[in-house]
Amino acid sequence: MKPVLLVTNHVPPDRVPGLIALHDAVGLELAIYDGRLHHATAGVEDPGVPFQRLRPRAVHALAASGRHRAVVATSAGRVALPAAFSGARRAGVPFLYWTGIWAPVRTPAHLAGALLMRHIERGADATLAYGPHVAAYALSRGARNVHVVPQTVDTEFWSQPGDAAAARARLGVGAEDFVAVYAGRATPGKGVEVLLDAWRGLPAGPNAVLALAGVTGTDVVALPSGAQALGMVARAELRDLYAAADVVVIPSVATRAFREPWGLVANEAMLQGTLVVATDAVGAAAGGLVRDGHTGIVVPGGDPAALAAEINGLLDDPERHREAAAAGARAAAQHTPLAFAQAVACAVSTVAADTPPR
């Protein structure tokens, strides 16, 4: 049976279990072109499935080779995506577009390629959407045969109990002190400055700490009292931080160039049973994983006052959203690598009917 070709850039560690499950379901070959890094961690050396590394411009020839029964490509990559689409058309095999875009992207490059993107969106034999928010946008763009694919992390790793005591010791805080955690880069759209503005507005004393994982002291103009820039943090230490946190904040904001497609930090933190406060510019909130008052808290993007009010409420009563945190853990536990693989396999079976999923 011919494999399915998946064209992507970096493969972060959390993608590996899902790719292995997908390989078991349909047979898979990865084409990794190592384009722009879209995750906080670098790609793995070995994704655990058959793969090759190549330049983006070599994608067309591989997709057109006739060695695959379908071609899947992600929305990342200015050259790789159209090369994979045109190669699949040359080979006469189905093309599946995997996307997390749920709002117009208005950078000069995207505006220049708008007609080409519309052609790919409408011409794809199936669309794999990060969540219902992405599916709705894809349908509005003329996509057909749209499938919602659960966004997942390595659920086995992130659900293992973290060492909260060790994390609090590294932060220099006691067991009763309040800890808020941010995990991600300090790039436009991530909302780090909004979070810092919210923190500055709190009546927080020395018993409250804001831990910024993935952020260095040079990434921000000035850190407010109680904030610690931790730089890059290893996965195991990040899991410990989630376990130690009273809340994990995802403060993303919408920009002309960026709308948070999902925010896997939500999955990671929720699997530790930690409350997540996310803005409405976060895909995990728009896609229904973080539901305000049910599985977490959702606040308006770019509104430091609203964010400060939620954090201040937690400072006064850290237990008041305990039920939401527990419900969040149950919800995140449904976003498994197997669920991801089954959704993609279902989409493949609709366009490659001669090779149903195993």
Image (cartoon, grey):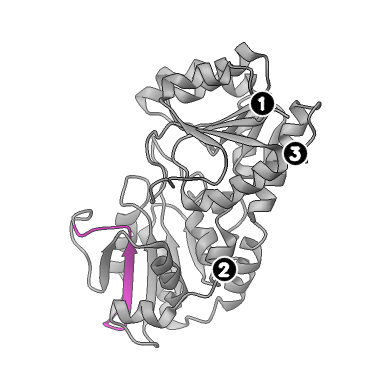
Q: Could you say where residue 257 lies in the image, as x and y percent from the top left?
A: 39, 35
Q: Could you say where residue 167 lies in the image, as x and y percent from the top left?
A: 37, 76
For disc 3, the neighbor class at 10 Å (few under 14, some 14 to 19, many from 20) is some
Q: Which residue is mark 2?
A: 159
* Residue 100, visible in the rendered structure: yes
First in sequence, mark 1 or 3: give its number: 1
Q: Quadrant of residue 25?
A: top right
Identify the residue at horizontal 27%, vertical 69% (top origin): 227
Q: Which residue is mark 3?
A: 346
Q: Could you say where residue 338 lies in the image, as x and y percent from the top left?
A: 68, 52
Image quarter hosting the N terminus: top right
Q: Which residue is mark 1?
A: 70
Q: Which residues are magenta?
A: 202-217
Q: Is residue 72 left or right of residue 11?
A: right
Magenta stretch: dominant secondary structure? loop
**216 falls in the magenta region:** yes
First in sequence, mark 3 or 2: give its number: 2
The amino acid type of the residue labelled 3 equals: Cys
The amino acid type of the residue labelled 2 equals: Ser
Separation (CA) of disc 1 from disc 2:
34 Å
Q: Is residue 111 left or right of residue 209?
A: right
